[in-house]
Amino acid sequence: MDGADAAAGGTPRPFAKAVRAGDFVYVSGQVPTMDGEVVTGGIIAQTEAVMANIISVLELADCGLEHVVKVGVWLDDPRDFTSFNSVFAKYFTAHPPARSTVQSAIMVDAKVEMDVIAYKPV
């Protein structure tokens, strides 16, 4: 897959957007950035941005959210858990994936980061 987008300031990132290993696609952690800058707004706007980034990367591997089997979530502030879930639930309705959610300091101004594992036989 393509390498990660350049960070703010044009510094290359030393990892791939996603890697296919057999029938699995591992998507690197996605943060709420657009054009290298963190999206302004609260947890809802930032979660929507992260989901858009995940969908975009999954498309590179000919996958969609329906192929996601596991999600890792990092929240900067655990008080955002309910609001985060309200957005997450819109995208994963019929067959929700397994998920882990932890609190972690993320990059400056980012409130959420997510990575996913998708399964789609080649």
Image (cartoon, rainbow, N blue to C red):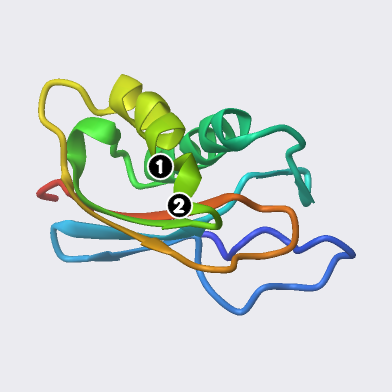
Whole-percent x, y for residue 77 in the image: 53, 53
For image coordinates 78% across by 51% down, the residue present is 36
For image coordinates 33% across by 20% down, the residue present is 90
Assign a secondary structure to mark 2: helix
Whole-percent x, y for residue 45 in the image: 61, 29
Q: Quadrant of residue 42?
A: top right
Q: Is residue 116 above or below residue 83?
A: below
Give the left or right position of residue 83, taking residue 34 as reference. Answer: left
The disc at residue 66 is none
Assign a secondary structure to mark 1: helix
Depth check: 63 or 66 in front? 66
Whole-percent x, y for residue 62 in the image: 31, 39
Q: Quadrant of residue 12?
A: bottom right
Give the left or right position of residue 51, taking residue 102 as reference. Answer: right
Label 1 is placed on what type of residue? Phe
Give the left or right position of residue 20, taking residue 32 as reference. Answer: left
For image coordinates 41% across by 26% down, the residue present is 87
Q: Disc 1 marks which residue?
A: 81
Label 2 is placed on what type of residue? Pro
Are the residues tagged 1 and 2 within 8 Å (C-beta)?
yes
Quarter of the rendering occupied by the N terminus: bottom left
**Disc 1 from disc 2: Cα separation:** 5 Å
For image coordinates 24% across by 28% down, the residue present is 92
Within 10 Å of the Cα at label 1, are there few (<14), some (14-19), or many (20+) other Cα atoms? some
The disc at residue 78 is 2
Within 10 Å of the Cα at label 2, are there few (<14), some (14-19), or many (20+) other Cα atoms? some
